Every structure is written in C-alpha cells, then in structure tokens.
Amino acid sequence: MAFETITVEVEDHVALITLNRPDAMNALNDQLLGELVTALEDAQANDKVRCIVLTGSEKAFAAGADIKMMSEKSFVEVFAGDLFGPEPDAIMRIRKPIIAAVSGYALGGGCELAMMCDFIIASETAKFGQPEINLGVIAGMGGTQRLTRLIGKSKAMDMNLTGRFMDAEEADRSGLVSRVVPVKKLREEAMAAASKIAEKSMISVMAVKESVNRSYEMPLREGLLFERRVFQSLFATEDQKEGMSAFMEKREAQFRDK
Ligand code: HXC
C-alpha cells in the first residue's frame, strides 16, 4: 500500500517506519495515525519482519497531535468519534517489538507515541514534553499515565503541569529512554538493536514483550507467577533445546521459532 505521511522499508528482518510530515513537524493527524496502524499491522503479519523501528526526522519525532486538525472540534465530535481512542489500542496489540528512535521534538502525542513503543533510543537532541496544558487540555494518550510509571510522580507532574521540555540527558537519567546516542548514529544504533532482537527466537521475544507489559497490569505476586509460568512453558519449544544445546556446544544458536 502506498503511504503519504509515513515511509516503510524492510531491511534484514527489520521494518523501519518513518513519520513523514516535514511541514508540520510530523504532527499526528487522522491520516498519519491510520497509515501508521496499517504499517504496524502489515509488519505484524509479515513473516520476514522480526522487529520494528519507528522514527521521525532529525528535527522532530512528532510535535504532538495536529492542533490545526483538533482546534475546531466540539466535545460531541471528539467523544462520539473517540478521538485518539482506537489507534493506541491497535498499536498496543502489536506483538512484535517496536523500538522508538527519537531525535528532536517528541511532544504531546509524539511523546505518548514513543512511550507506546517497547523502548526508546534517543539522540542527544531529543526533547520530550507534555505541553498540552498550554493548549487548555491535558495529555490524552498516556502522558499522565505511562509517563508517571516511567519517570515517577514528581517529574510527571512537573512536565504535565508546567509543560516544560525534558532533554535527552534528563530523559536518560529519569528512565524514560534506554540510551542516548549521537544524532548521526541514531538510525544505525536503533537498526542494530533491532537486528540483535531479530536474531532471537520470536517465541521468546514475544514472551518477553508480553511479560514486561503484564507488569503494568498486575500486582507483583501475580506478575511473578505469570513470568514463571511463561518461563516454564518455553521448555516446550525446540528453540529452548537449541539455545541451551548451542551454549553447551560453544556455538551460535540457530533459532527456528518453533
Ligand atoms: C500542528 C504543528 C504542530 C502540531 C508544529 N506544527 N507542531 N502543526 N500540530 N502539534 C507546525 C507549525 O504550525 C509550523 O507550521 C511548523 O510545524 C513548524 O513549527 P514552528 O512552530 O514554526 O517551529 P519551531 O518554532 O521550531 O517550534 C517547534 C515546536 C512548536 C516547539 C515543536 O511547533 C510547538 O510548540 N508545537 C506544538 C507542540 C504541542 O503543543 N504539542 C502538543 C499537541 S496536543 P506552519 O505551517 O504554521 O508554519 C497533543 C494532544 C495529544 O499532542 C492528546 C492525544 C489524545
């Protein structure tokens, strides 16, 4: 399918999805979100794809939901149409890992989109923020929820109440991102991380994603039980036999997703 607001390349088992509305700092409108969901669902269905990287431009990952699209909407329109409801749900249903590679602005819905991914690699120029308060609204796709779990109440309150931006160094220190790399190396580092994941057994990879995400939904005792049962169930796979045999035979494992 031809997309107008994103580009998709599949390279060595990794789907690289690039947000591409340069005139609007990759602001998220209906078309972009629709195309993004389609591309992610395509990647999920494509057996050649084992990991996904989501990125923007050097200047902006995404500067938020499209303010021009939203400004004149009424309560009835956004409520009845469930503005920004279906897309996050669809993104969270993707079972393959998604790495956000963030350079420049990741604001409002852009920061929230990055947080919907499984982890964030940031360039030194990345700036995160939830500035919706300046528009007379609040975050609506996780800025008060996921951000609070990731960086704690004090910093999440600060960002949501003052609308200030957090730079890459602070985001790294606060646990919002997994690592910070030079801007020119961002894509390469994200693709390298994705390729590393692509070498693993997809069964274990999907089990990790599901188990870590369960930690947000259940009490610790239940989460630990869930994890242990998934760990034990992986002994039913050929990939567990292969992985452990390869270790003992001092060779690289050849996983077959079985
Ligand atoms: C629509 C946007 C936009 C946005 C930037 N643009 N952000 N258009 N929606 N969110 C457009 C500008 O209008 C402008 O186009 C062009 O991109 C370049 O932006 P400038 O402002 O000229 O660039 P600069 O001075 O470098 O400032 C960059 C910026 C600023 C700091 C990112 O644009 C900004 O503050 N943007 C808004 C950030 C924001 O409030 N995000 C939260 C949105 S609400 P034109 O054609 O005018 O020159 C949200 C809610 C999510 O995300 C809730 C989900 C349920």
Image: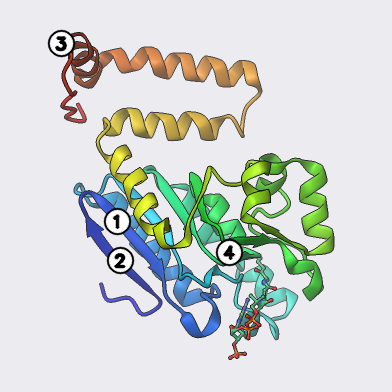
Q: Which mark is residue 110?
A: 4
Q: Reading the chain from its start, which is encountered first: label 1 or label 4?
A: 1
Q: Do labels 1 and 2 touch, CB within 8 Å?
A: yes
Residue 9 position in % (x across, y down): 26, 64
Q: Reading the chain from its start, which is encountered first: label 1 or label 2?
A: 2
State the residue position of label 1. 15
Q: Reading the chain from its start, which is encountered first: label 3 or label 4?
A: 4
- SS at circle 4: helix
Give, as a three-letter code, the residue at label 4: Gly
- SS at circle 1: strand
Nearer to the camera, 106 or 179 = 179
Question: Which is in the foreground here, disc 3 or disc 4?
Answer: 3
Q: Do labels 3 and 4 touch, CB within 8 Å?
A: no
Task: Using residue 229 as the reference point, say whether residue 222 is left or right of it.
Answer: right
Q: In which quarter of the image is residue 114?
A: bottom right
Residue at 15 percent across and 27 percent down: it is 254
Give, as a three-letter code, the residue at label 2: Val
Residue at 39 percent across and 67 percent down: it is 18
Q: How far apart are marks 1 and 2 (CA)?
A: 7 Å
Q: Reading the chain from its start, which is encountered first: label 1 or label 3?
A: 1
Please say if 63 is above or below 229: below
State the residue position of label 2. 8
Residue at 61 percent across and 59 percent down: it is 111
- SS at circle 2: strand
Q: Distance between the residues labelled 1 and 4?
A: 20 Å
